[in-house]
Amino acid sequence: MIQVNRIAELPGHQNPIFTVEPSQKPGIFFTAGNDKGVVEWSLKTMSFIKVMFPVKSSVYAIHCVPGKPLLTVGERSGEISIFNFVEQKITKSLTLHRLPVFDIKSILSKNELVASSEDGTVSVWSLDDYSKLFQFKVAEDTVRVIAVSPDENLIALGCKDNVIYLYDSKDYTLVATLTGHTMPITSLHFSPDGKFLLSGSRDAQLKVWATSDYQLQESIPAHLFTIYDIKFHPTKPIFATASRDKSIKIWDAETYTLLKTISREKGMDGHRLSVNKIAWESHTERLISVGDDKLVLVWEIA
């Protein structure tokens, strides 16, 4: 039996929030969206800490690089800012992309940063000196989302053309294309054991793909509208999905059965508008959600 308790509502954003990311430091997380800055929050005190730094345009992506004192931010302008926690300032701005950057991930085994853009390309950067290592064309339109497999051998890219492209991270060669969604891909996440890739789309379908042969295993009508995010729990065999239909759903990670729906329609004090992003904070194992209603909500899932 899944028990869900909303333990905090953190106001402060003046506009829709597009992304949330746990810090490398336990109990800290960051949010950003259509406001003028990246915001730092405390899960210990359930309160605002500070605006980390101002931004020039809407922020669609935040990525904290594991094991490094770095916060990376992708903006609507195409700029990627790299904030160094030790120096407490932006130490580098990457200005290759001319269209919005929608996602950023790191490949620690290669010490690389990977970013995807509305220009249909993915850029690869050195985490040593922030030099551009590679840029490759994936699709004619937006590369919306990136997922890196747990062993870091595979990179999955979800695109506006309804296709998921799988690349070998060693040399960025295409190894497979996954077709089955009927609308743009908006969320991707590998299972913790790396055996499956989960995808969500504007078609509201949740699909499960085997990474052994890239075959479709499950197709679930999970939500009423776009699935904007998929995140696995850090220790338990469950995962969560977030949707434009204003709901968060908790699923069994082994059977893919629905365990709980968090929404106002189900009598819970959830988001009033689209839920744009979710994150599990690994130290507290709490779920954080952000949305178009300008709210940051914190949930305890037991």
Image (spheres, grey):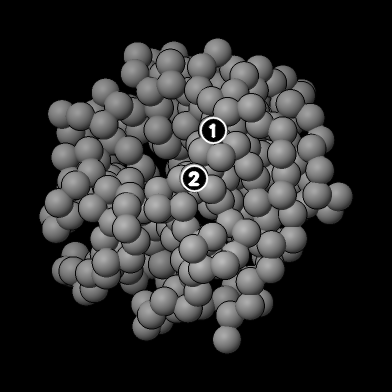
At which x and y percent is residue 99? 34, 18
Q: Secondary structure at mark 1?
A: loop
Residue under numbered circle 2 = 273
Residue 169 as seen in the image, left or right of residue 184? right
- Let me know if residue 271 appears in the view: yes
Which of the two marks, 2 or 1, is nearer to us in this view?
2
Q: Are marks 2 and 1 in contact (CB under 8 Å)?
A: yes
Residue 239 as seen in the image, left or right of residue 294? left
Q: Nearer the viewer, residue 300 or 207?
A: 300
At which x and y percent is residue 138? 20, 35
Q: Secondary structure at mark 2?
A: loop
Dot 2 or dot 1: first in sequence order is: 1
Q: Quick check: 60 above or below 216?
A: above
Identity, as a three-letter code, of the amino acid under mark 2: Leu
Q: Quick check: 141 above or below 111?
A: above
Q: Nearer the viewer, residue 220 or 71?
A: 220
At which x and y percent is residue 72? 56, 31
CA distance for labels 2 and 1: 10 Å
Q: Nearer the viewer, residue 30 or 70?
A: 30
